Amino acid sequence: MLVNMKFEGRDLISINDLSRDEIEHILDVASKMEGIKSPLLEGKILANMFYEPSTRTRLSFESAMLRLGGGVIGFSETRTTSLAKGESLEDTVRVIEGYADIAVIRNWEQGCAQVCADCAHIPIINAGDGSGEHPTQALLDMYTIRKEKGKIDGMTVAMCGDLKYGRTVHSLIRALSLYDVRVKLVSPKGLEMPRAELKAVGKDIEISEHHDFNDIIKEIDILYATRIQKERFEDPAEGEKAGIAYRIGLDLLKQGKDELIVMHPLPRVDEIEKEVDSTTRAFYFQQSQNGVFTRMAILSLLLGKVK
Amino acid sequence: MLVNMKFEGRDLISINDLSRDEIEHILDVASKMEGIKSPLLEGKILANMFYEPSTRTRLSFESAMLRLGGGVIGFSETRTTSLAKGESLEDTVRVIEGYADIAVIRNWEQGCAQVCADCAHIPIINAGDGSGEHPTQALLDMYTIRKEKGKIDGMTVAMCGDLKYGRTVHSLIRALSLYDVRVKLVSPKGLEMPRAELKAVGKDIEISEHHDFNDIIKEIDILYATRIQKERFEDPAEGEKAGIAYRIGLDLLKQGKDELIVMHPLPRVDEIEKEVDSTTRAFYFQQSQNGVFTRMAILSLLLGKVK
Amino acid sequence: MLVNMKFEGRDLISINDLSRDEIEHILDVASKMEGIKSPLLEGKILANMFYEPSTRTRLSFESAMLRLGGGVIGFSETRTTSLAKGESLEDTVRVIEGYADIAVIRNWEQGCAQVCADCAHIPIINAGDGSGEHPTQALLDMYTIRKEKGKIDGMTVAMCGDLKYGRTVHSLIRALSLYDVRVKLVSPKGLEMPRAELKAVGKDIEISEHHDFNDIIKEIDILYATRIQKERFEDPAEGEKAGIAYRIGLDLLKQGKDELIVMHPLPRVDEIEKEVDSTTRAFYFQQSQNGVFTRMAILSLLLGKVK
């Protein structure tokens, strides 16, 4: 660990908060967490503040905390909270920090995790703030790539689907930009990665944009799929067409390198055909499980129980 | 334990999955769990996947897991899950198995627990799938009978109320059919036990059907009541009448054997009058608590922590 | 501890259940709980029965139980419980006591906690029953006063805001009446403390009623604010005016004693201006955290793990 790397007491709001060395260190710690159950966080309490529905992120943090011997409190929707009585987010956080040692927040409003971090005295982890960021997802994605490929440098990564609204890919491309990678963006017209996101990372890595898998399928090491929400299209027929054009099946994958792997942040609807699940290319369920190890690492580091 | 009896890693989907010896073994283990709190399942995580409301089954499993030192994650309704985003049940289970060591599922769709078991690598326990089965309920019922009567063989059991839609009695009659028992079915017209259920077990045990308690009250050892939902009747007046005719009160019980006991899977509305609660015949609250011991046994066995 | 003071197995339904000596003892135990995490309640299970939304009370009890090594089960709304199926509160409690060692209940119906206590064999804690009582809130308020002031006797306490419907102040004034205090009640017209509440405590302590902070601001040691719900006023403009007239800001506080502190049960809407938060007078967030220590004491005492 580098001399100036310090995690204890920090917040994790944006992937931009982390240097490449810090990301590498988190992934190193995560790999030591695989298969481990320990009392490392015994006596510590995590508060899960989920203002929006979430199965996997919420349960993944809970599983991570329980595996390390900690306890979990929290809420998973707004109706049962004091927000319904007009309490400000800041007040809620100041109360929660009296109950817990660390808190995870998901909310629909961009920037709200930072607002919490600014007023809280305990570490705050952003678990998705609207169309903003979702840094622990990016970290588990990076972990999955490094674990399956042995490294991140040198990879050619395609991100496909809804690149406009998907916060997952926004966080991931920022993390990748700290490495020596090439990124191929494949999306329907109208759902391209926003110019601002591109500009933020475009100076660091080689990026190309496409509307057709055929342009890129032979070159890539990782195919990172995301959900296309048909409601995003004004014309429903357009949405239907896009869903079919960007669906990943065996025929497409046959054209790829032998080592090509498929990732997806889940939940999936029909972006990846079920027949892919049983192939050696499918890594989305492992990816989801890697979220537990990555979050075990993050919780331990921010709570100062691992250096 | 018989040589070929193996619980570790198995699912519990239907009471039909179990032999008489296996049921006996589960009940033996359950009786050792009474009053015990131990760290037997320390480090293990149970996922409670409740797509439908449930107080007692969900909390009973949680209590069982906590008493054995394990942790619990999960959800208790559909709105806060990824199902709302169109995820398939199979995908949800494959994600959950990355977070937990064992899962309990309740869903309104018959057969869905089997679907989960087919794709999951962790043990799956069916906690009620629509009008299908609810095997842990049947096991706690059997446990209650054996505990209070000392044995199951030789008993005469009346099941009454809604025998058509009540999944509890469907699972229970199958479990009983492995024993030397007599079963009396007492229900309003139109809510009789389905012919298919009867046929499945009728060759093994002596079954008779009735519409009046007076036919059977003197002969029985166990009176197992279930809820009659008035909405099941086309004519509301019929429902009202049935509710009254099949209500169990002190007058009826006075005609029974001294050793007659009353059971009910709960929740009760008014099938059993409150005045019965304080009599020595009332065993429904103990029965509910027996669910904790039975589920402690099932969790320990399926997780391979008890042989 | 006095000879006849016994907490094990008791319920906590009303602040009236407690003598001054008993309150003092609870506060003594609470002060030992500050900053402690211990396995004192290992193997014990708390059931949180929240029929109404609540963030802070529910999470505060959960945090208290987890810090002492216990486990928590429960529900946080009615829809996912058997109440939806017509089960009586009594039946629910009799089932829950089979799963847990102690239960906390919040319900909208006044008197329901007593109903539960009457039929349950485990300790029941009232966490708010409609416009009835909320004794653990009063205890944490008393704890905060004693901790910050070193004593309760001799204090002059102003309660302001909605004194009619606020159950918090009803419980608090009863607890205060066991001490040598002066109480100033400050409320908008129409939201005065009910005559019955006043009569219950008026013989024991000196109470005066006001409609203007200026009458009392110079004399008081503690300013206890509560939320004014504008919906309580027939004329919305009246509600708006009251909200402004009873808002606590720096200008008002400047006129108070140097040692004047501000408390609030939270959630706050705009009764206290945010600029007060960063002053040394603001104790509402500490007060909220004191709830954890107070509830740790109560759980340990009622479960007989602390004498």
Image: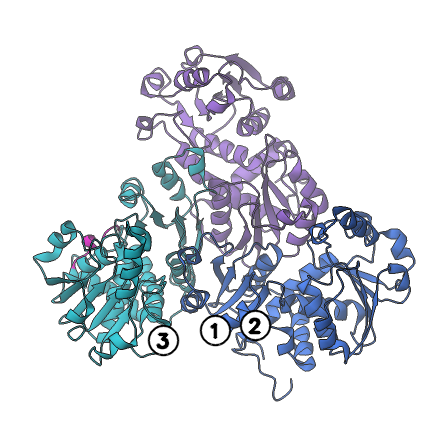
Chain colours: A purple, B cyan, C blue
* Comparing labels 2 and 1, the label whose residue is closer to the camera: 1
Q: Name the foreground residue: B155 vs B166.
A: B166
Q: Which residue is drawn at 52% across and 58% down?
A: C51
Please name the amino acid that badge 3 sits on: Glu
Q: How far apart are marks 3 and 2 (CA)?
A: 35 Å
| Mark 2 crowd level (few <14, some 14–19, many ≥20, 10 Å Cα) | many
The boundaries of the magenta stretch are: B13-19
Q: Which chain carries label 3?
A: B
Please name the amino acid that badge 1 sits on: Ile
Drawn side of residue C32 relative to residue C253, left or right = left
Q: Name the foreground residue: C307 vs C236.
A: C236
| Mark 3 crowd level (few <14, some 14–19, many ≥20, 10 Å Cα) | few
Q: Distance between the residues labelled 1 and 3?
A: 22 Å
Q: Which residue is drawn at 21% across and 78% down?
A: B255
Give the labeled residue for mark 2. Answer: C300
Give the labeled residue for mark 3. Answer: B275
Same chain, marks 2 and 1? yes
Observer able to see residue B31: yes
Q: Which residue is drawn at 64% across and 87% down?
A: C2
Drawn side of residue A254 relative to residue C134, left or right = left
Task: Confirm whether the magenta stretch covers residue A264.
Answer: no
Give the labeled residue for mark 1. Answer: C122
Q: Residue at x 27, y 60 (%)?
A: B242
Q: Is mark 2 on a helix, strand or loop?
A: helix
Same chain, marks 1 and 3? no
Residue A247, given in percent of the width and then of the height, sits at 39, 20
* Comparing labels 1 and 3, the label whose residue is closer to the camera: 3
In which quarter of the view is residue C110 placed?
A: bottom right
- The image shows a total of numbered marks equal to 3
Please name the amino acid that badge 2 sits on: Ser
Residue C182, given in percent of the width and then of the height, sits at 82, 73
Residue A4, given in percent of the width and then of the height, sits at 68, 39
